[in-house]
Image: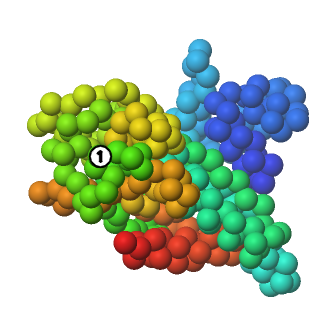
Amino acid sequence: MRIHARSISYFDMIRRCGSIRGAARHLNVTASAANRQLLALEMEVGEPLFERLNAGLKLTAAGEIFADHVTNVLQDAQRLKGDLDSLRGLQRGSLNIMAVEGLQLTLMSTLATQMLTKYPLIELKITAGSASEIFSAVANGDADAGIGFTTHRNPALRQAVVARFGFVAILAPKHPLASKRAVTFAECARYPLILPTPNLSLYGILQPALKDYALKVVLQTGSVELMRKLAGAGLGIAFSPRVGTGREAEAGKLVQVPLKTAKTLFWEMGVYVRAGRSPPPALDAFLKLAAAEIELRQGRP
C-alpha cells in the first residue's frame, strides 16, 4: 500500500470538517479535487473510509482505524520538525492547548506568560472547552494537550500531570462568613448560592454534597468567571477548586474560604496528551512548565 502525504492531509481535513466542500475551502482547492483524492485513497486502502450521509460524512470502521494512523503520522511529522528546529537551536514550534474555562484567567494565564517569555518563537493557541470537548480534541489530535477535571480514565489519553485541589467558598469581602477560617456546606446553605449548570464538571462534584440541604439558588450558570464575579459583588456564595481562584482574591475583590466537609471533597485536575505520543520539544517544554506551576499551586495554603 502506497499512501502519499497529500492524500493523508486531504483525508485529515475531510475528517475534521465532516464534508468534502468544507475541506476543499480550507485546503483552497475545488471540491472535485478533494473528492478525487479521497476516492483514490479509498481505492488504495481497499475500503470505504467514510459513510456518505445526508448530514455529511461519517467515518466507517476502516476510517476510524485509518484516522488513528493519520493522526500518529501527522503528530510524528510535527515532532520531527520540532526536533530538527531544536537541533538548530531555534526552539520553534506551535502548540494548541485546551483548558476548562475556570482555568483561563488563572493557571493558563500564568503558563501562557511563562511559555511566551521563555520560548518567544513558539506559536501558542489556547482555547476553552468542556472536559469532554477537551478529551475528545486531544484524543483526535486536534489539540496537543488538554487540562481539565478527571471524570474517568480514557485509554486514548495519557495523564502527563495530575494534582488534587480542595474546594473553597467564594464570598464578597463583607459577607458574614468571609472572616471565618473554614466553612461548611450547612453554613453556606443559609445564604443565597450561585451554582454551576450540569454541563460543568464542578456540578458533578458539588451536587452530591449539596443534595441534602434546602438551598436558595439565585443563579445557575455555565460560566465559572460569572460565578466568581457575582459572588464578589455580594449576590451569593459560589464554590471553586482552589486552583481556580485568581487575581480577584489577590486584589481583595473577593474572599476564598476553605470548605470543611465530612467527606473529603477534591477536584482532580490532569494535563492530558494523546496516549502513545512522544511529545515534540515545544509540547515537552509546556508540560514541564505546567508540572512545576501546578506543583507550586498545590502547595499553597
Residue receiving disc 1: 176
x and y percentages locating residue 276 in the rendered image: 50, 67
Question: On the rendered structure, is 1 left or right of 158?
Answer: right
Q: Residue at x 23, y 43 (%)?
A: 188
Element class at badge 1: loop
Q: Nearer the viewer, residue 49 or 270?
A: 270
Whether residue 1 is visible here, answered yes or no, is no
x and y percentages locating residue 67 in the rendered image: 58, 47
Q: Nearer the viewer, residue 236 or 64?
A: 236
Q: Residue at x 88, y 33 (%)?
A: 29
**Crowd tier of the residue under label 1, counting other residues whose Cα lies within 10 Å: few below 14, some 14–19, many 20 or above:** few
Q: Where 1 sits versus 63, above or below?
A: below
x and y percentages locating residue 282 in the rendered image: 69, 71
Q: Where 293 sits versus 172, above or below?
A: below
Whether residue 206 is visible here, answered yes or no, is yes
The quarter of the image holding the N terminus is bottom right
Question: On the rendered structure, is 41 left or right of 101?
Answer: right
The quarter of the image holding the C terminus is bottom left
Q: Nearer the viewer, residue 55 or 253?
A: 253
Query: Which residue ends up furthest to the top in the rendered image?
Result: 54
Question: On the rendered structure, is 180 left or right of 3?
Answer: left
The three-letter amino acid code for the residue at tag 1 is Pro
Task: Name the image colouring.
Answer: rainbow
Q: Nearer the viewer, residue 279 or 287?
A: 287
Q: Where 294 sits versus 233, above or below?
A: below
Q: Residue at x 61, y 22 (%)?
A: 56
Q: Residue at x 64, y 75 (%)?
A: 285
Total labels: the figure holds 1
x and y percentages locating residue 17 in the rendered image: 67, 33
